[in-house]
Amino acid sequence: MRGREPLVPHRRRRVPPQFSWVDHRLVRDGYIEGRSAEALALYLFLVTVADVDGLSWYSEAAVCRILSWAPAQLTQARTELLEAELIAYRKPLYQVLDLSPSSFVGQRTSRGPSGKPVAIGDILQGLLAPACAEHAGKEVRDDRLPDVEPHAGDARARQAQCRADRP
């Protein structure tokens, strides 16, 4: 294949025996978009030193020394990665978090116990069910909403019934 041969064959990259890799979803799924260079440098460092579970125990002083940072730079980069839910941190332990969509609770694709995606209507139904339990299974008619054929999983119908029955 044309263009598929390494430029320097004797320096071909190999997967090392330790558990260090950078997940391609970091780029493909847009996790790095809008991140600062410091946050990305910290992420690369943590991915590089993490064990198979994504854990590392480098002290703040060691991270600052290795990255040539002041403590404030580390704090800012760590905060950015925490807010992006790319890492977890409890001094002195860092964890690089899984990027799988199913590992996010309430983000991206929500999945039920069967592993299948859960519709937003069903999620809302679960939230509304305690307040509107008496309306389960009733046919609903509300002129403020488009015509809806009510069924067991229709949260809009239950919500409309709850609004219609309020005093």
Image: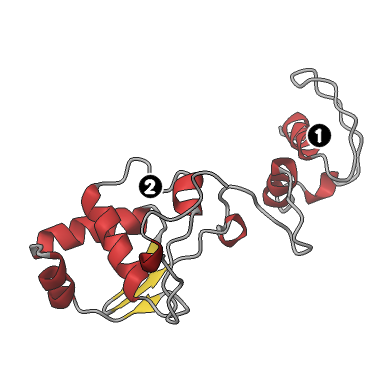
Q: Is residue 147 above or below residue 66?
A: above
Q: Give percent across and percent down for residue 139.
A: 92, 34
Mark toward the viewer: 1 or 2 = 2
How busy is the neighbourhood of tag 1: few (under 14 within 10 Å), some, or many (20 plus)? many
Taking the spot 75% from the left edge, 64% from the top edge, the residue there is: 113
Q: To which residue does mark 2 refer?
A: 32
For the question of whether residue 153 can be seen, the reply is yes
78 lies left or right of 134: left
Callout 1, which amino acid?
Answer: Ala
Taking the spot 41% from the left edge, 73% from the top edge, the residue there is: 20
47 lies left or right of 145: left
Disc with the residue nearer the chain's start (1 vs 2)? 2
Identify the image quadrant of residue 69.
bottom left
Identify the image quadrant of residue 21.
bottom left
Q: Which residue is more in the foreground, 64 or 154?
A: 64
Q: To which residue does mark 1 refer?
A: 157
Q: Which disc, if any, is residue 38?
A: none
Q: Give percent across and percent down for residue 83.
A: 35, 54
Callout 2, which amino acid?
Answer: Ile
